[in-house]
Structure formats: structure tokens, C-alpha cells
Image: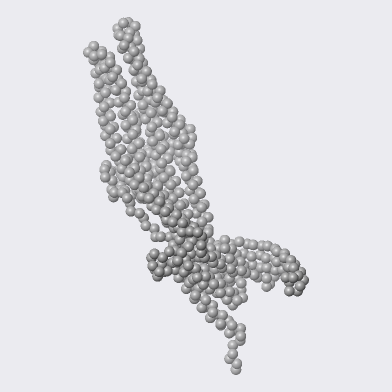
Amino acid sequence: MNNVQPASDISTFTMLTLMLAVFTVSVGFGVVLPHLPYLIERLLGAGVQLEQISRHTGLLTAVYTLSLFLFVSMWTWLSNQSGLVIATVSLLLVSCTSLAPPYVVPVMPVEPRYALYATQEGVRVTTIGWRDYFTDPRLQSLIVQALANNRDLRTALLRVDEARAIYGIQRAEQFPALDVQAGVSRLRVPADLNLARQSQVISLYQVAVGMVGWEIDFWGRVRSLKDAALDSYLATDAASRAAVIELIAQVANSYLTLCELDERISLARQTIASRTETLRIFSRRFALGATSRLNLTQVEALLIQSQILGAQLEQSRETQAHVLTLLVGASVDLPPLPGRLGAQDMLVELRPGLPSDLLVQRPDIAAAEYQLKASNANIGAARAAFFPRVALTSLLGTASAELDGLFASGSHAWIFSPSISLPIFDGGRRRNNLSLAEVRRNLAVANYEKTVQSAFRDVSDALSARRWIAEQTVLAEAALKTQAERARLSQLRYDNGASTFLEVLDAQRELLSAEQQLVLTRRALLSSHISLYKALGGGSLEFVPISPEGLNTP
């Protein structure tokens, strides 16, 4: 009995053996190649240049690409099914590394706690929204309008949409772009180029689907660019939340300034009415010869001074209304606020917490950290440019010399074409590009540290202002009581002939100044509370930040 196997079986056995060898080489290179730069750096020393590493990896990358090509060719020959070529793409999806340096959060360059005036009373800013902090219904209505209509905030939100689109574009670079191609070609071959020595017209009809020039991301260049785009997107989102906080604080301060001006105008009008009546009395006395011309002119001067103050305050109110209109993005028609400024319990007491809380609460710090991460990822992309770039073109379809034979049996066609490009000389462009990325990373570190320091100072300034302006308010109230009593006694002394009218004039001027100063101080105290609210990162509770976990997918 003949035990000799058929030639086809021997060929199949031989091809399977070769395929196993090539497959082992391919997988081995696929596992080792992404980590090769670090292995070479360990073997050659820490001071080795990236150009030297790229020269060592270039040859190995070429061997890996060739082994993949041989494996695909033999698999296709063995199976005689060109559709299996597409399945070999999975061999290319080996674990890739990133050449970006490991991200390290900079040490917080501030003290571990606030030095002065940080009490543990009040609520945490992270537990309340802006509606819970600003309880005045009119102010809440203005903030709602501003969040809906403010053009600067709208621009910031559109920047977020822009950054999201950029991230989507960069993320798509990780995946192959599948295209359907169809075409027809007609070619005339001259007789001297044809073996039959006759001119010939050749037609080619083809339809194919596949990918062209897809980069296999061995060194993480595309992934680093994707990570940088993602961090830039998250930084833009954090910046938009910082814009929300800034807008809320601006609207609140503008509203308080408007309320302050309303109260000061009311006091000025009362003073003008009182001094108008005093001028009427002194004019009657002067007509009867009961007082001098000097006293009459002094009363007139005092009335004019109060009228000038009233006109200045009216102008300031209109200007402040224009500012509020611009912030709100719509016309504002607010009647004067009834009552005394500060008597409505407009704000909630806040507890500052620790400086480390700012890293979580302040969106501008979060934006600076995301920018730092983006610059760190750009270093990885700049490093990857030193290493070979492998691209793959693969098409599967049908081709025929006749249109009616395009989809006939035996017309299947495919192309599998890996390519490798190894940078040799570029005049220092890649080296300078890496230096630029490293400098920008250092700038991002400095910007992050400055942002943290500025946030610490904002909180410290707000705490200091809240402490000392509260004391100034108490002193201003005491001063007003003293000036009111002085004005009463001066008028009584003048009526009894114990003093001149000049003493009354001085007392009334000081009384008006004390009234105006008390209103200014009360508004400044409320503004210090708003400054603390903004410095602690409040105001964005209703605007949930984007989670990077749901976006950072391969």
C-alpha cells in the first residue's frame, strides 16, 4: 500500500509549518516592538538620543511589517479565500505604548490652610447651588436671564462645542477609514511595448472596499494626539464653568451696586428736600431782616452741593443699569429697592474649608490642569515622530476587463500593501518640535501653579475683606449715629443763639457724608461675600462637568 502523501498535502503541511513560524515572529515583534524604545534606552544608557533609538527600531519595524505581509500572503494562498485577508488586520491591533512622560501633579505651592479669618461656621459651597446662595427673587431672575442671554457665556459654550468636534476628529484618526471605490480605466499599449507587436486597448472595471494609508499606531503618536485633544476639550468645558461663576458674580455685584445707588439717591433726595425747605425758611427770614445775606448764601450753597450729589448719583445709576443690561443680555427695568441695603438677608454664610478643596471646586484650576495634561500628551506625539511610521493599505473587491464580468465568478481581487517610512534627516525639525512641546509643558506647569496661587490669594483676600469690612460697617453705623446727634445739637445751639450757622452747615455736610459712607460700606460687605463665593468655586453646581471616563475610549 502506497503511504506517500499527495503533493498538495505535502505543500499544505509545509505551508502550515511556515505560517506557524512567521506567525510566531509577527506576534513576538508585535508584543515587543511597542516597548522597544524603553528597552533600547535601558541597554544603551539613559542619555541615548531619540535619533539613535529610532535607527535601532527602524530595521526591526521593517522586519515586523515584512513578516506580517508574508503571513497574510501564505494564509490567503492556503485558504484560497481572499475574504480572509481582512481578518488579518486584527493581527496589527497589538498593544501600543505611549511615549508621553508619566503625568505627575505639581505640588500645591500654597500653605495647607488659610492663615486668618477662616471659620468653620456656615455651609460648604459645594453643597449649594447659586439659587440657594442668592435668595433675592429679583437677583435670581436677573441671573437666569444672564445665563440664557449673555453673549460672552454663549461664546464660551460654543468654544466647548468646537473643542468637542476637534476631539471627535482626532479620535477618528485611530480607526481605519473604510471607503468604497469604483472606477473604469482604458489604456492603449503601443505596438513596440506589446509582445505581440500590435497595439492594444485594455479596459479595466473595478469595485473595491477597504482602507488606504491607515497608520498603525505602534508608538502611540495618534493616541497621544487624541489624549491631547480630549484634555483640551475638558479644559474648555472647565473654562466655560469658570465663565458661569464669573458671570453670576458680575450680575450679583452689578445688582448690589444698583441697589446701593438707589438707597444713596433716596438719601440724597431726602437731604435735598430738607435743604430746600431750609432755604425757603431762610429766604423768608432774610426778606424780614431776621438773618444775614451770608447765612442765606450758605444755605443755598449747601442745597446746591446736595443737588450736585443727586445728579451724580442719578448718572451713576443709569450707567450701572447699562452695565447690568449688557450682562443680562436684555433690557432691565428695576424699580428702586425698598428698604435698607443688607437688611434682606440676601446671602448665605459660607465656610471656606481647606486650600486643597480648591483643586476640586475651582473650574479654572481644573482647566489649567487639563491644559497641563494636554501639553504632556503632546510630548508623547513629538517623541513618536522620531520612530518609523507604518501604514497599511488593504482593498477587497472585484475587477474585470468587461463590465458584464465585473461580478462574475473568478473576478475577486484584493490588495494588501503595508508600508514603512523611517525619518533620516529633516534639518532638526523633529528635535525642535520636541523641544517646543517640552517648553509648552513647562509653561503649562507654571500656569497651573500660578492659577493655584491666585485662587489661594482670592480666598484669602475675600476672607480678609469680609472680616474687616464687617468691622468698618459697625464703625460706620456708630459714626452715623454720632453725626446725627451732632447735627441735632448744632441746630439746637443755633436756634438758641449759642453758635453760628456755620457750625450747623458743617454738621449737616458731615451727616450726609456719613449716610452715604454707610451705604457704601454695607454694599462692600455684601460684595466681599460674593467674592468669597466666587473664590471658592461656587455657582456651577447646576452645570455638571464632563466626565473624562466616558470619553477616553480607544
Q: Residue furthest bottom?
A: 1
Residue depicted at 50% across the width and 67% down the height: 93
Q: Is residue 554 visible?
A: no
The answer to whether residue 425 is seen in the rendering is: yes
Out of 76 and 18, give the one closest to the viewer: 18
Q: Is 65 or 368 nearer to us in this picture? A: 65
Residue 209 horizontal/vertical position (percent): 62, 64
- In the image, 189: left or right of 493? right
Judge whether 153 appears above or below 219 on screen: above
Q: Nearer the viewer, residue 274 or 358?
A: 358
Foreground residue, 95 or 55?
55
**Up-down relation of residue 519 to residue 133 (above or below):** above
Q: Position of residue 123 (x, y in %)?
A: 32, 44
Tell me the residue at 36%/23% (across/down).
268
User: Where in the figure is residue 499, as x and y percent of width and height?
Assistant: 24, 14
The N terminus lies in which quarter of the figure?
bottom right
Position in image of residue 425 (x %, y %)? 51, 62
